[in-house]
Image: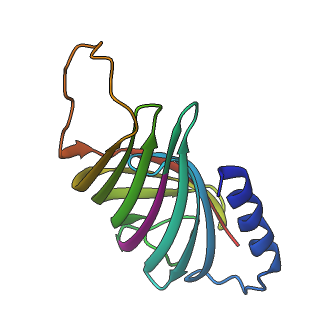
Amino acid sequence: MNFKTFYSLLISLLFCLKTTSYAQEGVVLTTGYSIPELLHIGLNYQFDQDQIGINYGVLPGSNTFSISAQYFYHYGGISKVSTKRKPWFFKFGFTHLQDETKLSLTKYKYVNAQLGRECSFTKQFGIRLELGLIYEVDKEKIEKEKSSGMGFGINFDFKLLPAPGIIVYYKL
């Protein structure tokens, strides 16, 4: 499924949902750029100070995509705009990332832990800033054809990487 198809299905689903808007409970639509989710759209469900969600992301100009699942716990601070949800949060997630080139198909599995803050502009709309770490749990590389041997032979294979993100959200 490509990004446009997924986005169309997600928007259609959101229009079909009949949700009541509560300060502590409801559906949250997200989009942004983060590591490991890439340029993504997502759907979260908020209940009390907890939030669960899924994302589908792409890396523009490549055959790279990601599918993520995450859990948030909002723990501290006071928001002047959002009545009860605390703006500071911990986020834990799992991501499947797939990168395909002419020579190979590489599949990665990551776990991530991030700390972040939501900055609400209205009761429904705001941005989320995140910073944390991702850890590569698994990597599978499938060679499609032999490499010509051209290149520098440098391997930038790091298991632990920084994970920043900036996300726009809208609470339905």
Point out residue 125 in the picture as x, y percentages from the top left corner: 65, 59
Most foreground residue, 148 or 120: 148
Q: Residue at x 47, y 31 (%)?
A: 102
Q: Residue at x 46, y 76 (%)?
A: 52
Give the quadrant of the N terminus.
bottom right
Q: Residue at x 41, y 69 (%)?
A: 70
Which residue ends up furthest to the front in the rendered image? Answer: 146
Magenta part, dominant SS: strand
Most foreground residue, 134 or 105: 105
- Which residues are drawn in magenta? 66-74
Point out residue 66 in the picture as x, y percentages from the top left corner: 47, 53
Residue 83 visible in the displayed image:
no
Residue 78 visible in the displayed image:
yes
Q: Is residue 22 above or below residue 116?
A: below
Point out residue 157 in the picture as x, y percentages from the top left corner: 20, 36
Most foreground residue, 108 or 123: 108
> Horizontal placement of 71 versus 7: left or right?
left
Q: Is residue 60 above or below residue 29?
A: above
Residue 49 picture quarter = bottom left
Is residue 58 a member of the stretch shown in magenta? no
Point out residue 153 in the picture as x, y percentages from the top left corner: 20, 19
